[in-house]
Amino acid sequence: IRESLRPSFKGWTFAEACGPFFQLAQISLALAALHHDVAFIRLSVVAGNIFIFAWMIFGAPKWPHLWNSDTAALHWDVFAWLTAVLVLNGIPMLQHFKFDDSRVSFEVPHHEDLIESVWAEWWRRSGIPRTDFKK
């Protein structure tokens, strides 16, 4: 803000569009809002952050370029955020995709199909396993 008060500041202008990695990141993050499935929300968030990481280390190029050799560099903060996102979202996402409790049965006398369909919906939306749903 302080910089905008200086006489050298000519006012706000529209810059060129950011490069393809930035656009892919924004699309991935927007897809997270459209999903109702926890695993795919996490997948979109992880993909979006990987694309932001690529865009930054390749020098934050403008559209349609993939590389800006003048500003390409490794940024420790971008790497730290990517690591945090991968740990906080990537590991649970992989666990969600890999998890298999198909051998657990609900052991209810009636309406097992209904209970199975309710659990399947909850599994997709929240990641709750059968063993926790059963309790």
Image (cartoon, rainbow, N blue to C red):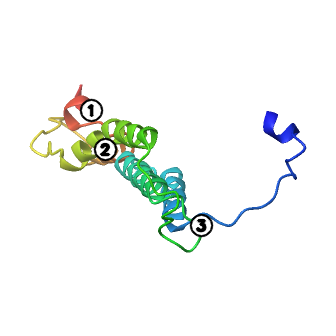
Amino acid at dot 2: Gly
Residue shown at 55%/64% (left/top)? 61
Q: Quadrant of the N terminus?
A: top right
| CB atoms of marks 3 and 2 within 8 Å | no
From the image, state whether disc 1 or disc 3 is nearer to you.
Answer: 3
Q: Position of residue 26 (x, y in %)?
A: 54, 57
- Identify the secondary structure beneath mark 3: loop
Amino acid at dot 3: Lys
What whole-number distance in Å separates the C-alpha atoms at marks 3 and 2?
28 Å
Residue that carries the numbered disc 1 in the rendered image: 133
Residue that carries the numbered disc 3 in the rendered image: 62
Q: Count neighbours of disc 2 (C-alpha within 10 A) and say few if under 14, some if 14 to 19, many if 20 or more.
A: some
Q: Count neighbours of disc 3 (C-alpha within 10 A) and say few if under 14, some if 14 to 19, many if 20 or more.
A: some
Q: As rendered, which of 15 and 37 lies closer to the eye?
A: 15
What whole-number distance in Å separates the C-alpha atoms at marks 2 and 1?
23 Å
Number of disc labels: 3
In this rendering, the answer to whether 96 lies above or below 24 is above
In this rendering, the answer to whether 61 lies above or below 1 is below
Q: Position of residue 118 (x, y in %)?
A: 34, 44
Q: Quadrant of the C terminus?
A: top left
Amino acid at dot 1: Phe
> Residue farthest to the top?
135
Residue that carries the numbered disc 2 in the rendered image: 90
Earlier-in-chain disc, 1 versus 3 = 3
Q: As rendered, which of 126 and 77 lies closer to the eye?
A: 77
Q: Position of residue 107 (x, y in %)?
A: 14, 35
Residue shown at 21%/37% (left/top)? 130
